[in-house]
Image: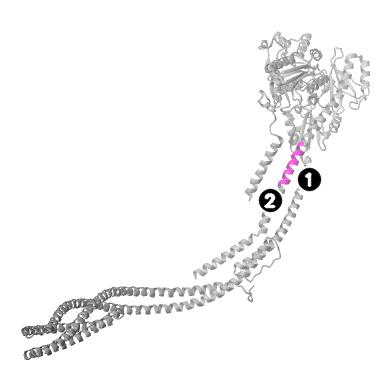
Amino acid sequence: MKEKERERTRKKESVKETQKMKGISIKVKLLGIILPVVILIMTLLVGVSYYISRSIIRNYSRNLLSSSISSQASQIKGWLNENLSAFQMVKQMIEQTSPDEEQLQGILDAYCGYHDNYPQGLYIADENGTLITAAGAGKTEADPVQSVWYKEGLTRWNMGFTSAYTNEAGEEVISASGILNDGSDTVKVISADLTLQRISIIVNSYIEMDQAQAFLVSADGTFIAHHDNTLISKKLSELNDPFMDHVAAKIEQQDFELAEIDQNMTAMAQIDGTDWILVSYIPIEIIFSDIDTVRTSMLVIGLISALILAVLVERVVHMVIRPVKKLTNVITSMTDGDFTVSMQTKSSDEIGIMSRHVEKFIVSMRAMIASIHEVSDKLNQQAGNSDVISGQMYDASRQQGISMRELNETVEQLSLSVNEIAENASELAMIVADTKKAGDQVNDRMQQTVEVSKHGKADMQHVGSAMDDINVSMGKLQQAIDKVGKASGEITKITGMIGDIADQTNLLSLNASIEAARAGEAGRGFAVVATEIGNLAQTSANSVHDIEKLVEEINSLVKDTITQTEESVENINDSSRLVEGALATFDKIFNNIDDVSGLVQEMLVKVGEVDNVATNAAAISQEQAASAQEILSASETMVTQVDSITGNSEGVSEGAKELKSSAEELYGQVARFKTKKEAGVQ
Amino acid sequence: MKNEFVKESMLLMVLAVLSACFLSGCGKGAAAGKKDLRIFMTVNSIDAFRQTIVDAAQAKAAEEGIQMDVADAHGSIEEQVEQIKKAEAEKYDVILCSAVARDTAVQLKMSAGDIPIVFFNSCPEDKHLSTGKYMFVGSDEQVAGQFQAEYVLGALSGRQEINVALIKGPKGHSATNGRTAGAKKAFEESGKKINYVFEDNADWSTEKSQEIFSTFLRTGMPVDCVICNNDSMALGIVEACKNAGIDLGSLPILGVDATADGCAAIEEGSMAFTVYQPGAGQGEAAIEMAIALAEGRSTKELEEIAPDGRHVYIDFEKVDPQNVSNYIK
């Protein structure tokens, strides 16, 4: 449950992510980068060129205004000096000619109306208040001595300009006046008037810079010339105009540097020879009006270019991005497991290649998912099967465990049996060893017997030859017969012993056969030997029987011989033949004994073999016992292993169950992928 | 991204600046050695004062092992222009020029071609000077006028209203303008009421100043002091006053230049004050500046260089009856 919830939230997050991703499309990003940069560059370009143009125009205007004002100033100076020189010439003429009153009047009259700059011409006043003017000049002065021109004229000999004043006729004028030294004792001042209106016209006519304005002020800040005539003779400070106040302040400080005052580029220049200051100014907005137009048009062009560029970029990006959008949708569908979508394109650019590859991918994915479908289906079934099988396996292994335990017990018993066999084999080996010893004894006796027999044979042979001596040696015969009797007794004893041995051997072989049979495969060889031994024993027994019979015969023959000997010595020939018969019989006995001896030796060899075999069998049995022990422990290990197999098979069973559920889950997961169009699903 | 853009543009700017510097050729080639320097000096009519400048300059040039040729223009602007043209043709390294008329500065510069000019004695208008090429050595004329006004204000400290007669040099002469302006400025700053009862140009002339002042004296206007732009004119005033029977002890007459006659007049009590213009110092400074210009060195290292970098001002010295003996040769 929890996992499902987690998955759900994960899905939600991924959906959110994709939504976020959709929020910032490539188009927006590209536009977001390109447009600000373009706008920035354009703004910078416009700004920089505006700034540069502005400073160029500013410098240009400064230079223009400077040269304008300096040329204007020198022109005004020239104009003033021209007038002043004219006056000075008249003055010098008067001073040098020292004319009388009439002549003086004539001179003054000559200059009346002579020049329209000074239509009244020159006039003279002396310290007594006498005013001499040209006839018809109309110049009046109530008290010439107190007039501005007179008072100021007294301060120089060379004529110079007075300050501005209003004359009696009500005109704003300045005068050029100076002391007239005509040689008389009376102090006289000669003067001529220039109207400020005319000066204003002159001042404004000489402005060289378009739209610039100029005015002339005296050092104390009084307007001498201004295009607005009403201002003439007024003080700068009277206007209550910030610009004029600033100009007045600058004049006060004698600071005639070009400056920007209250949005006016202002130049000032002193008119040489006077204390007048020419002020020329031009509003900055006029200077910059052209550049402002340029700026505006540049801004407009910049804006339009930016807009066109924006649209162009938007269109281009849109065209370029469209397949990407389609691709994005396809990939988004693919991410959601929908492989029913298709990405067809004819484009040959990178996006086209990408689309084709995606299409290939979709096709291959479809096939793959289909096969995964099948596989998971099968897997699901197989997991079910495996569950069942593992259950069965568990049962089987449990069963096996039980069986193994049983087997274990059997092996234990087997082990015990093998031990027993081993013990028996050991016992047998010992018996065989005893038998061998007994055999050896028999052999010794047999040898002795053979020796005796040999002696007997020789004796018998002697009998033949000594038959002649029989008569004489009846005693010897008696003795010999006794010896034969003894030998027969001995033989009987030996044959008895051999019979015993044969019996025992037979018994032993029987026993061995039985044991061999019990030992199974291991005892097969042994059984053969045992049988052989049995046969030998039988043969021995039979021979012994024969020997006994023969001995009995000998005994009876000996008795007969004795009687016959006793009875008949004459029948010695017969007896000879009898002896010969006996000899032959003895030969047979000897041969038999020899045979027996060989047999016994053979038997002894066999018994040795039996001993070896029995020893081997004992060792083998011991080994078998050890093996049986090992088998037992192995079987015990097997039991524990089977137990653990049972446990494991229980785990396998559980695993199979889990596998089954996993397979089911896998099946469910794979089912999410759609490879075929279904009704109602795109 | 932004950072990269900024970095890139800064890099571009640095490259642009470097290449601009490279193309324009930072620094200039070394100038001719000091020993090979040739200096031409043209002087507006050599008078007593200008002779002191010439003498000092020649002594200094000799000391430095520099060849210097001096020509007198005899007050003729034509002659001066000819002299400068000749100097240009003969490829002098620097021209020292005491302009006959300060208005001719543009013509003088044109005639000199590429040769730098050190102006002395008469200062051309500011706009015609430029650092490292056309410079001026002299004394700040305004200071001379200022010293005169200060003397008067000190001598007449008890007066609130002073009647001043101003005898000026030729119209438009830089010394006339500077000295007059300096005096007027100092008076104005004193806050006292100053009446300029007489103000006229006597063109450095003793005779003319005597004539015009005699004329003035006839007006009977009250006058408390006479300030002259130079000693020659002051001596004319002395004569005029003597002729008019005015007590020179009660009328201070002031001059500028501390000429021999002027100093003698001060010593005898006819003149009250003069200002010594150190012509020798100007001559030496002119040579130093000429060497600097010829070698393409920065003129900022020169002593007494004004903040505008175009003028070197040699200080005036006050001369009054107390110290006049120091200035009599």
**What residue sits right under mark 1 in the picture?**
A293
Q: Is residue A24 left or right of residue A80?
A: left
A587 in magenta = no
Give how far across and how far down residue A599 sits, in percent.
Answer: 22, 81
Quarter of image, res A399? bottom left
In the rendered structure, which segment of residues is drawn in magenta?
A44-59
Return the residue nearer the eye: B223 or A502: A502
Place of residue A418 in the rendered image (x, y in percent of width and height, measured from the top left): 27, 77
- Tell me which residue sits at (73%, 54%) in the image: A309
Report how far apart the C-alphas of labels 1 and 2 lie in the structure: 25 Å
Left or right: where does residue B210 sit relative to residue B65? right
Q: Is residue B138 visible?
A: no
What secondary structure characterizes most of the magenta part?
helix
Answer with mark 1 or mark 2, whichever residue precedes in sequence. Answer: 2
Front-lying residue, A517 or A309: A517
> Which residue does the image show at 36% across and 77% down from the upper left?
A401
Q: Which mark is residue A37?
A: 2
Mark linked to residue A516: none
In this view, the mark in front (1 or 2): 2
Label 2 crowd bin: few (<14), some (14–19), many (20+), radius 10 Å: some
Q: Quadrant of the C terminus of chain A?
A: bottom right
